[in-house]
Amino acid sequence: MSKLRIDILTLFPEYFQGPFTVSIVKRAVTKKAVDLRLHQLRDWTDDKHHTTDDVPYGGGAGMVMKPEPLTKAFAAIKRGRKKVKTIFLSPQGKPFDHAMAQRLAKEKSLLLVCGHYEGLDERVMSQIDEEVSLGDYVLTGGEPAAAVMVDAMVRFLPGVVGDRDSVEKDSFFNGLLDYPHYTRPRSYRGQDVPEVLLNGNHAHIERWRRKESLRNTFLKRPDLLKKVSLTEGDKKLLVEIEKELQG
Ligand code: ADE
């Protein structure tokens, strides 16, 4: 599989200094699993002040991002390349989730456009393939959303997370929340590691983990249970859980 290229168009390339130079994202870049490129939108302005925004027609608060620098930047970044998916980050977008991270990580090339102010001039929206939101709140700009998206996507790229098993057992991979984890010491502040995890019986451990995963989801995110397809075994485990909670 060829590596994923991600171009980020932003007024603040320096924002990414932190998130892209530590931990797993840094490893993904070093291992060349991802080709991350930052672009300063002001490079595509041609006035003395490098203006990227202007007052809204019709009046009102806030500024609007001018169409010309954006169009020039899109064309320059995409030049000579076919499959570039252009994504605008905004609170009006489709909510970003596990499935979207996994889907986008399979693309060849993404252009993440970070907005500021009240948004983009509507006439550039026809050049946007998808609008993506991090959640139902307003960020000061798209940069934090782009950093989060890159972080979540690189975990799916081959060779980035050493142990594939750990990615595949993560929360949300199967639509459920994670089960609890324990490490040494065996007894900590009066709380012991559950016995089942100590006896090496893998079938019992798997059953316990599945049940605790279902319990966590039932207690913390019952909405997710409606979306996953549960096996007959899962349904039995849920009945057990509900009985335990009542008893
Ligand atoms: N820009 C501003 N708010 C945002 C949000 N919630 N998601 C993505 N980009 C944004």
Image (cartoon, rainbow, N blue to C red):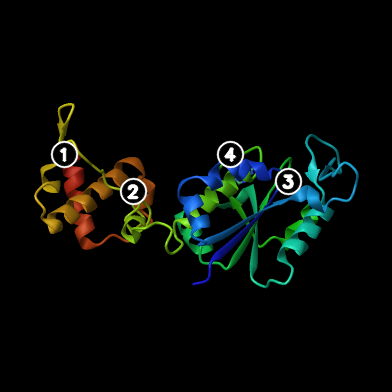
Foreground residue among 150 and 53: 150
Work out how far the residue at label 4 is from the one at label 1, CA to CA, in angstroms: 39 Å
Which mark, by number, is residue 119?
3
Amino acid beneath label 2:
Leu
Q: Residue shown at 64%/45% (left/top)?
A: 142
Q: Position of residue 199 (x, y in %)?
A: 9, 49
Under circle 3, the secondary element is loop
How dense is the environment of label 1, judged by Cα within 10 Å: few (below 14), some, or many (20 and up)? some
Mark closest to the chain's N terminus, 4 or 2: 4
Q: Which quadrant, please, contains the C terminus? A: top left
Under circle 4, the secondary element is loop
Amino acid beneath label 3:
Gly
In the rendered image, which residue does mark 4 sit on? 137
Farthest-out residue, left: 199
Work out how far the residue at label 3 is from the one at label 1, CA to CA, in angstroms: 51 Å
Q: Are marks 4 and 1 in contact (CB under 8 Å)?
A: no
Image-quarter location of ligand 1: top right
In the rendered image, which residue does mark 2 sit on? 177
Q: Position of residue 206 (x, y in %)?
A: 19, 56
Amino acid beneath label 4:
Tyr
Which mark, by number, is residue 193?
1
Amino acid beneath label 1:
Val
Give the number of the mark in front: 4 or 1.
Answer: 1
Mark closest to the chain's N terminus, 3 or 4: 3
Beta carbon at label 4 within 8 Å of ligand 1: yes
Under circle 2, the secondary element is loop
Q: Position of residue 166 (x, y in %)?
A: 33, 55
